[in-house]
Image: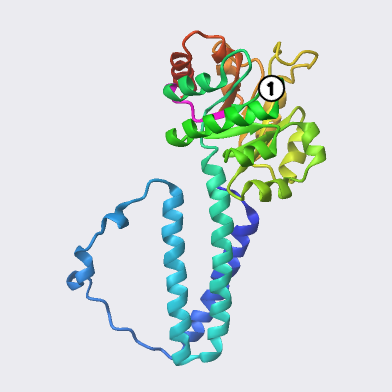
Amino acid sequence: MLEDKKPTLELKEIRGKLRKLIGRLIEHEIKFQQRRALKDIGRELYTPKEAERRTILDVFMANAKRVQEAMRVLEEFSKLIRPELGKQLKAIRFKIYDLEQKIFYALSRRLKLDFDLYLITDPMRDHVEVVREAIAGGVKVIQLRDKTASQKRLLKWAKKIRKLTQKAGVTFIVNDYPEIAREAKADGLHLGQDDLEKISIRQTRKRLGEDRIIGVSTHSLGQALSAVKKGVDYISVGPIFSTPLKIGTKAVGLKLLRQVMKRVKIPVVAIGGINESNIYNVRKTGCQRVAMIRAILEKKNISQTVRRIKRDLS
């Protein structure tokens, strides 16, 4: 799911070391008593907490704890047979603790990007009301964007929107302002190319929180690949079609989107002039995520429009 080479290699190394250490532990041919599974009293026990798994993140955490418990047992058991191996097993256990944290944050960020429709707000409609109606329609990601408002007003809106999105389980992203995203406890931040030149993705993520997502607008294959190298969680590509919201900006077209989809492994969001009449052509490029502004906000009934577009996307 994460397609991250570094933790994958670390896990493979741990597995290799464990295989060797366990081999040394059992080289004395110790025979373990066979478990009588059918008579085991634990067979009938199934607690409510054991049955509670709402997301893949819950499954990961449950299994990570099992691995840590197993490592602790191996470490203690080694002290009876090969005491010199205990230190190595302990080192592996702490390596697993570190990996658990890294994978937890990465997986948490990726789950926030499990969506098809991405709505961006605009001054043409009341931001908070738009969010309320869009949530009712089933949208899963919302970005607060207003280039004309003061930061004070944006923060006020952001806090209200955070309450609505948090209750509905919707990912909330703030455009441009890291401090507003942090203070409003938003799920993430979206940056433009100009912002990317001024700040460090790594440092910004530390300020926001390791589980917060960071996205960047890109307009060429070079920008897309550069953003991936800098460690962003997703990119938007556009404008795919011409749009009055980007005056003087040339549409990049579907060709670029296809190129990006072939080269980029992180989530890609198509944006710019996308509506119900051309959304099928966007989907044919392999892009599963689309962002919309006017195609939704110019409609009288936002909830109905969102439902209709989501049906088209699915």
Horizontally, residue 34 falls left or right of residue 207, namely left
Q: Is residue 62 above or below residue 197?
A: below
Occupied quadrant, residue 225: top right
What colour-coding does the image apply?
rainbow
Horizontally, residue 309 falls left or right of residue 266, namely left
Please give the name of the residue rendered at 49% of the width and 30% of the height, measured from the top-left corner.
140
- Name the element at disc 1: loop
- 254 magenta-colored: no
**156 vs 138, nearest the viewer:** 156
Horizontally, residue 228 falls left or right of residue 181, namely right
Occupied quadrant, residue 152: top right
Please give the name of the residue rendered at 54% of the width and 66% of the height, measured from the top-left corner.
97
Q: Is residue 116 above or below residue 88?
A: above
Please give the name of the residue rendered at 78% of the width and 16% of the height, measured from the top-left corner.
250
Q: Is residue 130 above or below residue 69?
A: above
**121 vs 68, nearest the viewer:** 121
Q: Is residue 269 above or below residue 87?
A: above
Q: Position of residue 212 (x, y in %)?
A: 60, 44
Please give the name of the residue rendered at 80% of the width and 14% of the height, measured from the top-left corner.
248
Q: Position of residue 49 (x, y in %)?
A: 31, 56
- 140 magenta-colored: yes
Residue carrying label 1:
149
- Count of marks, rendered view: 1
From where the camera sits, is residue 137 visible?
yes
**77 vs 247, nearest the viewer:** 247
Q: Residues within 10 Å of mark 1 (few under 14, many from 20)?
A: few
What span is in magenta?
137-142
From where the camera sits, is residue 266 visible?
no
Q: Position of residue 313 (x, y in %)?
A: 49, 22
